Image (spheres, grey):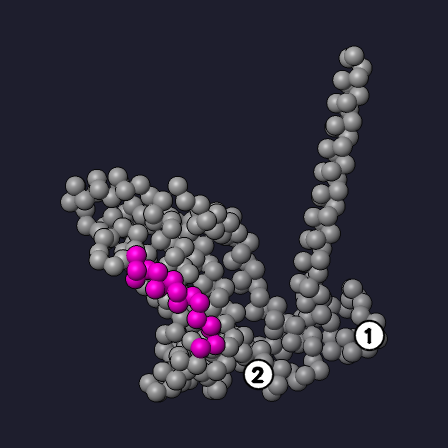
Amino acid sequence: MTETYERIEKRARTGARIRKIVTYALLVLWGIIVLFPFYWMILTSLKSYSAYNSEYVPKLYTLSPTIQNYIDAFTTVPLARYFLNTLLFTVVTTALMMVVIIPAAFAFSRLEFRGKNLVFTLFLSLMMIPNELVIITNFVTITDWHLRNTYLGLILPSVTSVFYIYLLKENFEQIPDALYKAAKVDGTSDLKYLVKVMLPICRPTIITITILKVIECWNSYVWPRLITDDEMYFLVSNGIQEIRENGFGRENIPAMMAAVVVISVPLIVLFLIFHKKIMEGVSRGGTKG
């Protein structure tokens, strides 16, 4: 009887070990598939123009890496200007959006006023409007205000987000009402309660929203391409197209890849630093109670 139990336990351990090996093997395979485009991008950026074009069959390695493509990325085209434009656009837009959405989320989660639920429902219904219609309306408005080819024209349509207000509101509502009532009894103002109590508690979600907005701004393409035709205001996303057409040329793929690597590095570093906060913030936003 004891031997039978030992066999069953041994088979169970063996089965668990096999499942673990298969799971990790699949995860490694999936990781290779996901990371391969990044590897190929970096590898191509390190190949010279002649070496890249002489490869009839693409090679997964290079014996003569070069950084000339990175030098060309900053000397042949105004990549540094595009980079600084994008940095300014991202920082200002994200800061203004946080100033807008935090009070809005606080009002919907804690303040009581007539028609609050109806207003919030109508607010959420804005998410059902196709982005194309919003872009057309914004383009007409910005054009009528003579804000094309200006930083203000780039920033204004992106300073709020219904989704982020909803996400933050759900987090604020997880904080017990007893804290708010106790703070009001002590004479604490709504602004002080928001800054001293709610924001520290919901810090993971605040960080998540900030990072997601930074990524959104950094990758923004359609609106900047539509509203700017002066390269003084180009962002890195639409600047890449300008690089392809008037900078390196359509055939100089290694130089293009070098520019893409330079542009991608800040977002990759940002994600590696804050990826745990992002996961924590998203999980908090989807949990209530």
Q: CA distance from mark 2 to mark 1?
A: 26 Å
The quarter holding residue 51 reads bottom right
Residue 89: % across, % down: 42, 72
- Residue located at (48% from left, 87% from top): 229
Residue 190: % across, % down: 22, 51
Q: Is residue 251 visible in this depiction of the protein?
A: yes
Q: Is residue 90 above or below residue 75?
A: above
Q: Residues within 10 Å of mark 1 (few under 14, many from 20)?
A: few
Asked if residue 54 lies left or right of residue 230, the reply is right
Asked if residue 276 lies left or right of residue 49, the reply is left
Q: Nearer the viewer, residue 101 or 44?
A: 101
**Image quadrant occupied by the C terminus:** top left
Q: What residue type is disc 1 on? A: Glu
The secondary structure that most of the magenta stretch takes on is helix
- Residue located at (45% from left, 75% from top): 85
Q: Is residue 138 above or below residue 144?
A: above
Q: What residue type is disc 2 on? A: Glu
- The residue to which callout 1 is attached is 55
Q: Residues within 10 Å of mark 2 (few under 14, many from 20)?
A: some
Residue range highlighted in magenta: 117-133
- The residue to which callout 2 is attached is 242
Q: Is residue 56 magenta?
A: no
